[in-house]
Amino acid sequence: MFNNLFGTDLDLYVGQYQICDPLFKRELRLTLEDYQIYRTRPGSSGIDLTYDRGLMLTYSLPTHTDITVELLNGSGIGPADGSRNFDNDKYKNGMVRVSQDLVEGVRIGGFGYYGKEEEGGIINTMWMAGPDLSLTLEPLELNIQYLERRDDDPWFTFATRKTTTRGGFGELIYTPEGDNGKWYAVALYNWLEVPQFTKYSSATGHFGYMLARNFRLIGEYTYDFEAKANKFSVGFVSAF
C-alpha cells in the first residue's frame, strides 16, 4: 500500500485483497454469519466480491467524496498454474465505487463492476451494481447494502443462459459504551436469490464481550428462513 502519491490524497494498493473492502469490510465483520451476497457466484462463475488480485486506487475529494477504482484478475486467489500465472484467462475486470458523506454520521455510496471470464472457450460477460447506506447515531450504527448482478452464461454451456442475481443485507450494531466498551450486540439480516436456482434469507443475533483488546467471547444465533433451520455458536475470537 502506497499512501499520498505525488503529495495528494491518492492511495495505491497492489496485490491480494477483498474487492468489497471499499463497500463494507467483510473480513472485519463482527458476526460469524457472512455478508452472503458478497460471496455468491451463480452457476460455475469464479467472480464474486471477496478475495482477488489486482490494483486499487482511492482518492478523497475536499467535498468528502471518496472514489475507488479497481483493476482485477477476476479469478479469485487460487494457486498459480504451471506457467506461474495467477490469472486463469486473458480478461481483466474493473470496479468503480463512489461514496459521499452527506452530514455527520450519514454516508451513501454506489458501485459498478464489469467483467468477463472464460472457461473451455466459452465467455461469460457479467456486471453487478448497487447502492449502500451507512447511518451512525451513537450508540447505533446501521449498514445497508443492495446488489444486482447479470450474467450472460455463468454455466459456460454454449447455449446462452442469462441469469439475474439479487440480494443484500442490513446490519445494526449496538455499542453502548463506544469503541472502548466491554460489550456490543449485532443484528444482521441476509437475503439473496438466483431465480429458479437459489434462494437464501436469514436473521442473526450476535453478542460479544471483550475480555481484552484482542480477545472477545461471542455467542450467535442464526435462523435460516428457507431451510427452517437454526444455528447457535459460542466461542472466542482472538488475534496476536
Image (tube, grey):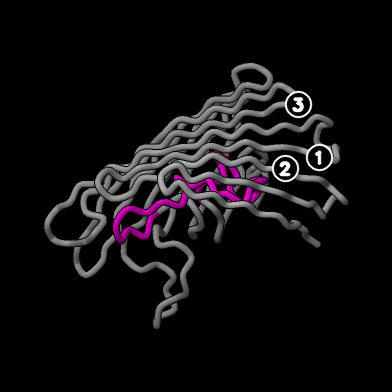
Number of other residues with Cα within 10 Å of mark 2, as a class: few under 14, some 14 to 19, many 20 or more: some
Among numbered discs 2 and 1, the one appearing first in the sequence: 1
Q: In which quarter of the image is the N terminus?
A: bottom right
Mark number displayed over residue 209: none
Residue 30: give x, y in percent of width and height: 67, 46
Disc 1: which residue: 183
Label 3 to label 1, Cα distance in Å?
12 Å
Q: Is residue 211 left or right of residue 155?
A: right
Disc 3: which residue: 139
Give the residues in magenta. Answer: 19-47
Disc 2: which residue: 207
Q: Is residue 142 above or below residue 24?
A: above
Secondary structure under badge 1? strand
Number of other residues with Cα within 10 Å of mark 3, as a class: few under 14, some 14 to 19, many 20 or more: few
Q: In this view, does 229 lie to the left or right of 4?
A: left
Residue 27 located within the stretch drawn in magenta: yes
Q: Looking at the image, which residue is at 22% across and 59% down?
A: 123
Among numbered discs 3 and 1, the one appearing first in the sequence: 3
Camera-side residue: 59 or 49? 49
- Residue at the top extreme? 103
Q: Which amino acid does label 1 sit on?
A: Trp
From the image, state whether disc 3 or disc 1 is nearer to you.
1
Q: In this view, does 128 lie above or below 46?
A: above
Secondary structure under badge 3? loop
- Label pair 2/1, CB-CB below 8 angstroms: yes
Camera-side residue: 32 or 224? 224
Residue 11: give x, y in percent of width and height: 61, 45
Q: Which amino acid does label 3 sit on?
A: Pro
Residue 231: give x, y in percent of width and height: 57, 52
Residue 231 located within the stretch drawn in magenta: no
